[in-house]
């Protein structure tokens, strides 16, 4: 044998129970096990980053996705790999409790079977406490292992700097320890950077991800989730959803408690021309205003039930703060707003009744 390939004799020559092994070429066989947690969206194992702007719906969408995994329900025609779900809601328990109740009331029968969904509602320092989290999961699930652990959000579970290479590397390592402990997927819900073009913080997070999904609201207020990157799968696929309000109970003051569920966008298959010019600016302003100030409209035969509306005057104020008119004169801006509003109503993109305005959801080519 060539000296380059001769084993070195001595105390280290023999390795007992090696961690690594070499497989000959002829022994390498194609694996046929399922590689996706959700076909074409989420890999069965690895680090997955779900990111978006505030109020983009990323937490609502992620919760809905993993509930389908826990229940074994096909997700938008995609096969899922069913199994227990661990959802770490680091941004508070009250919101996720209402979300769970909304899902229960909207989708589950009263006598539904037990759902293998486990909530961890306490904020923690993942770098320092990931081993304790693993121990609690093992103790709670006994001999069963989760198929996915959700960390929502990165910011609330990192007691350091997102921009630091060292701190982000430590966080990724902690997520990897969880992934290796259960041979599962770890979904990290994360915010966007200042310009909204990429996930916030050090690029080591995106460099370590096995898949990256962006979440954004389009001008029709739909939640659009796009596969930006997938190490072992297709890219560019999108899922379009909308939020549906559900009244889940009454608080101690007698006020209603409401949350939302995620449902497929009801404009699927329809096409409505996208507006341009001042009408497009006005539509973008309306989306922003409803996202910030929208409230469920009053009971009316003219306003669809459970629809978020705003006063027309508030919409007009937001429009006039933008460049809806080439002229800075108030009258010119007012006329431009009126024309834009009329155009959007003609296209049936918005609805207006009395002093309230809302989005109908009919804009552009809907994606499914």
Image: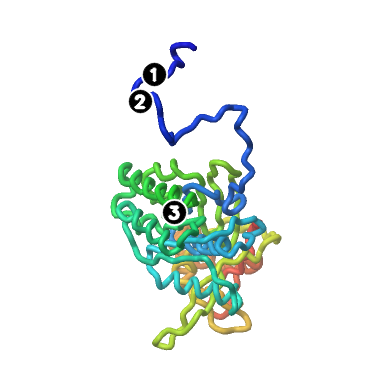
Kind of element beneath mark 3? strand
Q: Which residue position is annotated with label 1? A: 8
Percent across and percent down for residue 16 are: 41, 33
Would residue 70 be found to the left or right of residue 170 on screen?
right
Q: Which residue is mark 3?
A: 188
Closer to us: mark 1 or mark 3? 1
Crowding at mark 3 (Cα within 10 Å: few <14, some 14-19, many 20+): many
* Towards the viewer: 316 or 361: 361
343 w.r.t. 29: above or below: below
Residue at the spot x=35%, y=25% of the render?
12
Residue 243 quadrant: bottom right
Query: Where's residue 88, x and y in %?
Result: 42, 62
Q: CA distance from mark 2 to mark 3?
A: 41 Å
Q: Position of residue 214 (x, y in %)?
A: 51, 52
Q: Nearer the viewer, residue 142 or 358?
A: 142
- Looking at the image, is mark 2 or mark 3 earlier in the sequence? 2
Q: Is residue 25 above or below residue 355?
A: above
Q: Residue 223 bears which disc, if any?
A: none
Instruction: Please report whichever mark, 1 or 3, sits nearer to the chain's N-terminal start.
Output: 1
Residue 220 seen in the figure? no
The answer to which image quadrant residue 73 occupies is bottom right
Mark seen at residue 12: 2
Q: Secondary structure at mark 1?
A: loop
Mark 2: secondary structure: loop
Could you tell me residue 207's position as x and y percent? 44, 41
Q: Tell whether label 1 touches label 2 (CB within 8 Å).
A: yes
């Amino acid at each position: 044998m060539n000296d380059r390939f001769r084993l070195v004799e001595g105390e280290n020559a023999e390795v007992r129970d090696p961690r690594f092994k070499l497989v000959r070429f002829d022994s390498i066989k194609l694996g046929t096990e399922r590689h996706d947690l959700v076909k074409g969206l989420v890999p069965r194992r690895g680090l997955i980053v779900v990111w978006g702007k505030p109020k983009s719906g990323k937490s609502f969408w992620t919760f809905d996705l993993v509930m389908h995994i826990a229940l074994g329900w096909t997700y938008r025609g995609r096969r899922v790999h069913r199994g227990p779900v661990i959802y770490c809601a680091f941004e508070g328990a009250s919101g996720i409790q209402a979300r769970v109740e909304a899902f229960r009331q909207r989708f589950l029968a009263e006598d539904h079977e037990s759902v293998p969904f486990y909530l961890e509602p306490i904020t923690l320092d993942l770098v320092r406490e990931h081993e304790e989290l693993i121990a609690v999961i093992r103790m709670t699930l006994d001999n069963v292992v989760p198929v996915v652990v959700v960390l929502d959000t990165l910011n609330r579970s990192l007691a350091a700097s997102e921009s630091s290479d060292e701190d982000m590397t430590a966080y990724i390592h902690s997520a990897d320890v969880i992934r290796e402990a259960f041979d599962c997927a770890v979904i990290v819900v994360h915010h966007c950077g200042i310009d909204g073009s990429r996930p916030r913080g050090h690029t080591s997070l995106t460099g370590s991800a096995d898949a990256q999904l962006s979440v954004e609201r389009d001008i029709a207020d739909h939640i659009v989730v796009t596969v930006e990157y997938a190490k072992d799968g297709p890219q560019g696929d999108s899922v379009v959803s909308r939020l549906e309000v559900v009244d889940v109970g009454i608080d101690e003051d007698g006020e209603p408690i409401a949350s939302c569920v995620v449902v497929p966008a009801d404009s699927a298959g329809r096409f409505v021309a996208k507006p341009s010019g001042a009408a497009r600016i006005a539509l973008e302003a309306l989306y922003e205003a409803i996202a910030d100030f929208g409230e469920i409209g009053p009971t009316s035969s003219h306003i669809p039930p459970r629809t978020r509306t705003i006063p027309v005057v508030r919409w007009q104020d937001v429009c006039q703060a933008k460049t809806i008119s080439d002229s800075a004169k108030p009258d010119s801006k007012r006329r431009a707003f009126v024309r834009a509003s009329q155009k959007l109503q003609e296209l049936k993109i918005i609805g207006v009744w009395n002093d309230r305005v809302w989005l109908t959801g009919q804009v552009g080519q809907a994606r499914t």
